[in-house]
Structure formats: structure tokens, C-alpha cells
Image (cartoon, rainbow, N blue to C red):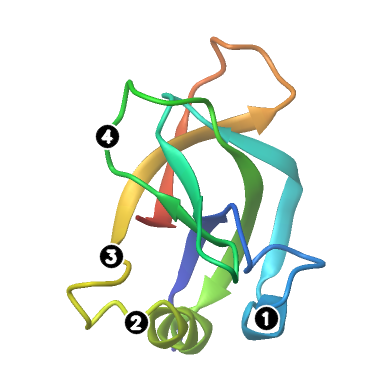
Amino acid sequence: MSVHHRIFVFGTLQEGHRNFHVNRGQRVGDHWVTAQPHPLYVMGPRRVPWLLNRPGQGVPVVGQLYEVDDAVLADMDRLERVDDPLWYERRQIAVRPHPGPADAPPETVWVYF
């Protein structure tokens, strides 16, 4: 039986972006925002987004939330090269529906830093 995971995407895994074909999950709601600000950079000629795991710095980051199964999460991990120490790592982050009240309880989900 496959387990379902919630993952917050803010870059190329979003609907309408170049790596969305890997994201075969079910979208949850409209938009979501990080509960705390984080630094977000767009790097290089391919404009690769990099979210840094430095809560409290940067800006609130708006993205999309998806529910994915084990196979889709594994495909995303391969795309984001989580086994390569120079690329992304998957960690948990708190997000809230956007727009929405700032005091709405956050949901803890996966994200690629």
C-alpha cells in the first residue's frame, strides 16, 4: 500500500512549469505560503530556484501544495538529486493557505531546500 505525502513546491515542479510532468500528485487548495520567511534565490541561466533552510530570513514564499504517493515522491527526489550533497535536500516546513489569516494553524509538509 502506498503512503501519501504532502509536498510544497515553489519552482519548476509547480503546475505550468518545466518539471511539472514529474509531479503527478493531486493539488491541494489554491496557493500556500511558508509560515516563516525563507531566502529564495533564482540561480544561473536556467533560472533554477533555490530555497534556503534559514527560517526567519528572506521573504514569505508562495507555492503550491500536492499530495503524492511514494512513487511520485521518489521521482521528485531523483529529479532534485537529493542523493547529491551539492543539490537539494528534502526537509519539513510549515505552510499556510494563501491568502488566508496569518494566525491560521500551519501544516507541516515536505519541501526541497
- Quadrant of the rendering where the N terminus is positioned: bottom left
Residue at left 72%, top 60%? 27
The residue identified by callout 4 is 54
Residue at left 43%, top 76%? 3
**Within 10 Å of the Cα at label 3, are there few (<14), some (14-19), or many (20+) other Cα atoms?**
some
Q: Is residue 22 above or below residue 61?
A: below
Callout 1, which amino acid? Answer: Arg
Please tell me the numbered disc located at residue 78.
none
Query: Distance between the Cα atoms at labels 2 and 1?
Result: 18 Å
Asked which secondary structure carries label 4, the reply is loop
- Quadrant of the rendering where the C terminus is positioned: bottom left
The residue identified by callout 2 is 81
Q: Which is nearer the N-term, disc 4 or disc 2?
A: 4
Callout 3, which amino acid? Answer: Glu
Query: Distance between the Cα atoms at labels 4 and 2?
Result: 20 Å
Q: Is residue 48 above or below residue 70?
A: above
In front of the other: 98 or 86: 86
Q: Is residue 103 above or below residue 88?
A: above
The residue identified by callout 1 is 24
- Which of discs 2 and 1 lies nearer the camera? The answer is 2
Q: Which is nearer the N-term, disc 3 or disc 2?
A: 2
**Within 10 Å of the Cα at label 1, are there few (<14), some (14-19), or many (20+) other Cα atoms?**
some
Residue at left 47%, top 46%? 41
Task: From the top left corner, tell me how far across and down residue 21 is, in percent.
Answer: 71, 84
Callout 2, which amino acid? Answer: Arg
In front of the other: 55 or 26: 55
Q: Is residue 21 above or below residue 42?
A: below
Query: Distance between the Cα atoms at labels 1 and 4?
Result: 29 Å
Residue at left 41%, top 77%? 80
Q: Residue furthest left?
A: 85
Please tell me the numbered disc located at residue 89.
3
